[in-house]
Structures are given as structure tokens and as C-alpha cells.
Image (spheres, rainbow, N blue to C red):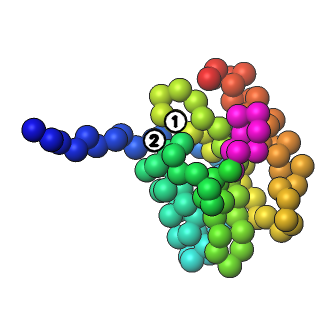
Amino acid sequence: MCYTEKVAAWTLTYYETEQGRCPVQEYVDALDGKEAARMTYGLDLLEAFGIVLGEPHTKSIGNKLWELRVIGRRHHRVLYFVVSGRRFVLLHAFLKKTRKTPRKEIETGKARMADYIRRYGE
């Protein structure tokens, strides 16, 4: 007998600073209605399809860091990394204004990833 196996969704974990801030959640909450809806849709895709989502929605930045690409009136990016247990940690969100992802934004993502790993492990 044939059957369909439901693949469990991935879990999205929002990085939290030691002061209790959640930068990605704050970024999403500050967006207007349509942009927030697009961002939510992008996050839902990541949660549903996980590592198989692929381009054009996701792209590797290198060193375990990935970016979720959300395009609306503006180009939004969410930097994240994968941890065990089918889980993504959403580290940093920003408005992309240039062709290349700015080094400053990547460095922010890397610093938050290092902080997360220091505090919680992988």
C-alpha cells in the first residue's frame, strides 16, 4: 500500500540578545502591511521547505550563514543559520539597497551567530 509521509516543518528561532531584544522580530514588526505580509510569506516558505527551499528564495553567504531573500517594493534580507533538530536561527534582518550584501550586515550576522553558539551551542 502506498502512503504519503508528511515531512515535519522546520522551526524558526528568533535570535535574542542578552538584553532580551529580538532584532528580526522587531524588523518585521516595523514593516507596513504589504511588506510585512511578504516577509511573513518568505518566513513561512523557509519554515515549510527548510534547506531544500533554494534559490531564488535563499542563498549561502558562506561559513554556515544563509540569507532569506524577500522581494516586495523593497528587497529585504534575513540572515540565518541551521542548527540541529531541523531548526533555523534568524539572526539579522535588513533592507538591501545595493547589489552586493554589505559587509557590515554580514558581520552583524556572524557576530550574532557566534554569540548564539557561545550561549546555547549548536
Confirm whether the magenta stretch covers residue 50: no
Q: Name the residue located 86 percent from the left edge and 66 percent from the top edge.
A: 98
Which residues, given as a range, are shown in magenta? 60-67
SS state under label 1: strand
**Circle 2: is it few (<14), some (14-19), or many (20+) Cα within 10 Å?**
some
- Look at mark 1 in the image and give the residue it sits on: 87
- Is disc 2 in contact with disc 1, using a CB cutoff of under 8 Å? yes
Q: At label 1, which amino acid type do we have?
A: Arg
Q: Quadrant of the N terminus?
A: top left
Precedes in sequence: disc 2 or disc 1: 2
Is residue 91 toward the left or the right of residue 107 in the image? left
Residue sitting at x 17%, y 42%: 3
Q: Main secondary structure of the magenta part?
A: strand
* Circle 2: residue type: Trp
Q: CA distance from mark 2 to mark 1?
A: 6 Å
The residue labelled by disc 2 is: 10
Q: Is residue 119 something one can see in this rendering?
A: yes
Tell which residue pokes out farthest to the right in this image. Answer: 103
